[in-house]
Amino acid sequence: MAEVICCGRSIREINSEIKSRIRGGDQQITVKDPGARHNLAVAILEPAHVTIEGSAGYYCGALADGSTVEVKGSAGWGLAESMLNGTAIVHGSAGNGAGAAIRGGAVIVHGDAAARAAVSMKGGLVLIGGSCGYMAGFMGQKGSLIVCGDTGDAFADSMYATVCYVGGKIKGLGTDTVREDLSSQDVEFLDATLERYLPFEIRKSKPAGKAFKKVVSGRRLWNFSQRDRTIWQEAL
Amino acid sequence: MCGIVGFLDKTGNHAGALGCTVLGMLDALGCRGPDSAGVALYGAARDGQLVARVALASGNHFEDSAAKIVGAAEKFGAVTDSSITDCYLRFRITGEACIRQLMDAVESVEPGTEVVSLGRHLEIVKQVGSPENLEATYRVSGFRGTHGIGHTRLSTESRVDLSHSQPFWSHGYPDLAAAHNGHITNYHQLRRRYEQRGIRFYTENDSEIIGMYLAGQLNAGRTLEEAFESMHRDLDGSFSCVVATDSELGFVKDQFALKPLLYAETSDFVAIATEEMALRNALPGDYAVREAQAKESRIWRK
C-alpha cells in the first residue's frame, strides 16, 4: 500500500507519482489530503486500486482503462468521463455529468448524482444509489443506467440504445422515451448488479430488482420521418 | 467562468472571523476568475445606524472628496467612524435616513462616486485583482459577522473595473447583495424595462440585473423564496447565484443546471461554493457536500 500526499503539490506531480508507484508494482494507492482537487487519478491504464481519502474535484478517474478509483467523499463534475474500462466508486454524491461518455466499465455513486449523469454513455454501467438530476441518460448510446432513487426532469432524453432502470419516481421522461416491462433477465441483471456493486449497508434500503421501472428509446428520433415532424419540433 | 461563495455561521457565537472564512473559500477559486474579487459581509448592526461604503471617484484627491461626501451625508444624520482605505470611504450615519435619498446625495457630490453598499449590516469590498490583493488592501480577514458572500470574476462581456466587480449591492435596497456565475441572456430586454421605470444601472454587467430583479420582487412584498421561484420564469440563461439579505443566505440555480454550485450544511455552518475546493480550503472537518440540482434554491436564516 503506497501513500501519495497531495498537500502543497501540483496535480501533475500527484498524478505522476500515482503512475510511477503503479509502474513500480504498487497495486493499492491511497491519496491523502485530496482537498477536492481537479483531475485526480486521471488516465490510469493499469488495474490498480486508487483510494482518494476525501473528496475529489472535476474529472476524477477520467480517461481510465482498467483502474479502480474509489472516492471516500464526494466527486465533482465529469466523474470518470470517457472511461474505457475500470471502476469508479464514489461514497458521497457526484456533480454534473457523472460517467459522461464512458465506453465501458462501471461508475458507481452511493449518494445522489446532479444533472446529466451518464450523458452520451457508449457502453458500461452507471449506477446511482440515490437520486439523479435533470437529463440523466441524455443521448445514451449503449450500456445501462440504473438509478435506485428518483430521477429529475427530462430523464433519458433522445437516447439511442442505453437501457435505463429507475427504482424511485420518474419526475419527467425526456423526448422519445418509452416505458417497457421488465423481463426476467432484467430482474436478474438488476439484482446481480446491485449485489455486486453496492455494499449491503447501502443496498438494504434500495428496491429489489423486480420493483424497478425500465425506460428505453422510443426509436422515433433515430431516423427522420415526415410523420414524426411534431416530435422533432419538440426535441429541437 | 466565475467563482462564487456563501457562508452562514449557525453557532450564534459570532466571534469567529467571518472575513477569514469567506476569504479562505474565495482564495481557492481565484483561478476561476483572476479579473476581480469581492466580498459582501454582514456584521453586527448598531442601533439606529447605517453603515456606508463609497467608492471615491478616481483622479481626485480622496481626502477632499471624502470631506465633501461626509458634508453631504450629514444633512441626513450625524456621521461617525469615517475612514478612507485605498479608494473606499466608509462611514456610519445615525438616523433612519431614506436610503435612496442618501445614496443620491452622496453620488451627486462628484461624478464617478458610487455607493458600493449601504445598510444596517452589509459591507461590500471589491476591487480589480485576486482575493490575495483584496486582503492585502482591505484586511478583510478580520471582519466579524454572521454571514457573507463572495465572488471572483472572469470577465466575459463587460469592463474590468471596481464597479463591474461583484458582489453587487441592489442599489437602493438596504442589505441586499448578490453574486452570480453565468450569463443572463434577456438582460438587455429586462434592463430596458427597469430603466423605463426610472431605475438606474451602474454597469453594463448582466449580473447587475439579478439584484435589481430581487429588489423589485421584495419591494412588491414577495419573499426571497418567491423571488427565487419566479427567477426561473423571468430570467433566461444560466445562473448560479448566491444572495444575502440582512438575515438570510440563499442560492438559486437555473433550470438547466448549466453552472456549478454545491453546498454543505452542518450544525455549525452553511457553506455554498462553485467548487468543493473552496469548502475544503476554508472549513476543515468531515461533512458531506452536495451539488445543487437544476432549479434548486435554498434559503437559510441566521
Image (spheres, coloured by chain):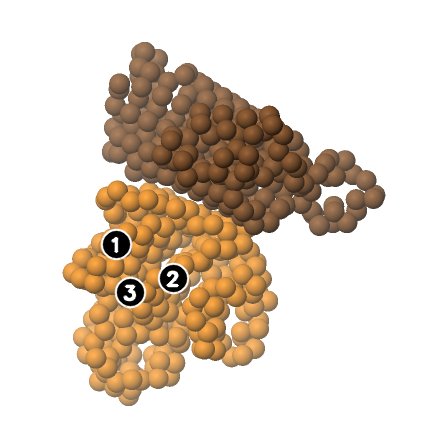
Q: Is residue B185 above or below residue A184?
A: below
SS type, badge 3: loop
- Asked if the residue under mark 3 is in contact with the one under mark 1, i.e. CB atoms within 8 Å, the reply is no
Give the image location of residue A180, x and y in percent. Answer: 66, 37
At label 3, the amino acid type is Lys
The chain drawn in orange is B
The spot of residue B63 in percent (x, y) is 23, 73
As displayed, is residue B205 above or below residue A105?
below
Q: Chain of mark 2?
A: B
* Distance CA(mark 2)–CA(mark 1): 15 Å
- Colour of the chain lettered A: brown
Lower sequence index among marks 1 and 3: 1
Mark 1 belongs to which amino acid?
Answer: Ser
Q: Which residue is mark 3?
A: B302
Query: Dot 1: within a 10 Å radius of its alpha carbon, few (fewer than 14), some, or many (20 or more) residues?
Result: few
Along the line of sight, which residue is nearer the eye, B2 or B214?
B214
Q: Which mark is residue B299?
A: 2
Residue at coordinates 44% horizontally, 27% vertically from top-left?
A195
Across and down, in percent, residue B66 comes to: 26, 75
Q: Are marks 1 and 3 on the same chain?
A: yes
- Disc 2 marks a residue whose amino acid type is Ile
Mark 2 or mark 1: name the one nearer the start of the chain: 1
How many marks are shown on the rendered structure? 3
Numbered tag placed on residue B267 in the rendering:
1
Residue in the image at 33% along x and 16% along y: A27
At x 45% / y 41%, what residue is drawn?
Answer: A130
Marks 2 and 3, how far apart at CA = 10 Å
